[in-house]
Amino acid sequence: MSKDSQGIVWEVFIRTKAGKPFRHVGSVHAYDKEMAMENARDLYTRRSEGTAIWLAKAEDIVASQPEDEGAFFEPSNDKPYRHPTFYELPEGAKHI
C-alpha cells in the first residue's frame, strides 16, 4: 500500500459537465475514500470547475510502459481492417 505520513495517494478525475468525459486533474493524499473525496472536492472544484469526481488509488492504476511500446502495440499493425482507412464511405453517409 502506498501510504506515507500523509496517507494514500489518490488520482483525481473531474467531469466538467454532464455528458463530457472525465479528465485527470491531479492527486490528493488521504487516509480513506471519504477524506480523499473531500480533499479532491476542496482542491479541484472550489470554483465550480466540475460536476462529478472519480477517485482511484494510485497503486491500483495499471499502465503500459514506454519501453514496451513496440512489442505491446505491434500486434494491431497487421490488422488493417481496424483502421478507418480500410473502408470506403458510402455516398450520403453523414457523421461517420
Image (cartoon, grey):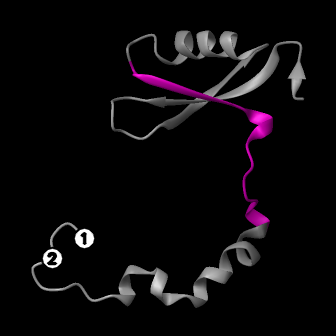
Please name the residue shown 45% across and 24% down the image. Answer: 52
> Going 36% across and 38% down the picture, which residue do you hit?
20
Please give the residue where the numbered disc 1 appears in the rendered image. 96
**In the rendered image, which residue does mark 2 sit on?**
93
Q: Position of residue 32 (x, y in %)?
A: 75, 14
Q: Are marks 2 and 1 in contact (CB under 8 Å)?
A: yes
Residue 21, percent across and down? Answer: 42, 41
| Residues in magenta, as a range | 49-67
- Looking at the figure, which quarter contains the N terminus? top right
Rendering quarter of residue 28:
top right
- Give the side of residue 68 with respect to residue 34, left or right: right
Depth order, front residue of 81/27: 81
Whether residue 1 is situated above or below residue 48 in the rendered picture: below
The amino acid type, in three-letter code, at marker 1 is: Ile
Q: Is residue 60 above or below residue 4?
A: below
| Residue 53 part of the magenta-drawn span | yes
Disc 1 element: loop
Helix, strand or loop under label 2 = loop
Identity of the residue drawn at 76% across and 25% down: 9
**Badge 2: residue crowd in 10 Å (few <14, some 14–19, many ≥20):** few
Q: Position of residue 3 (x, y in %)?
A: 88, 22
Q: Name the image quarter holding residue 27.
A: top right
Q: Amino acid at mark 2?
A: Ala
Name the residue located 38 percent from the left edge and 29 percent from the top edge. Answer: 16
Image quarter where the C terminus lies is bottom left
Tell me the CA gap for discs 2 and 1. 7 Å
Q: Quadrant of residue 54?
A: top right
In the image, is 5 to the left or to the right of 95?
right
| Dot label at residue 5 | none
Residue 15 in percent (x, y) is at 43, 31
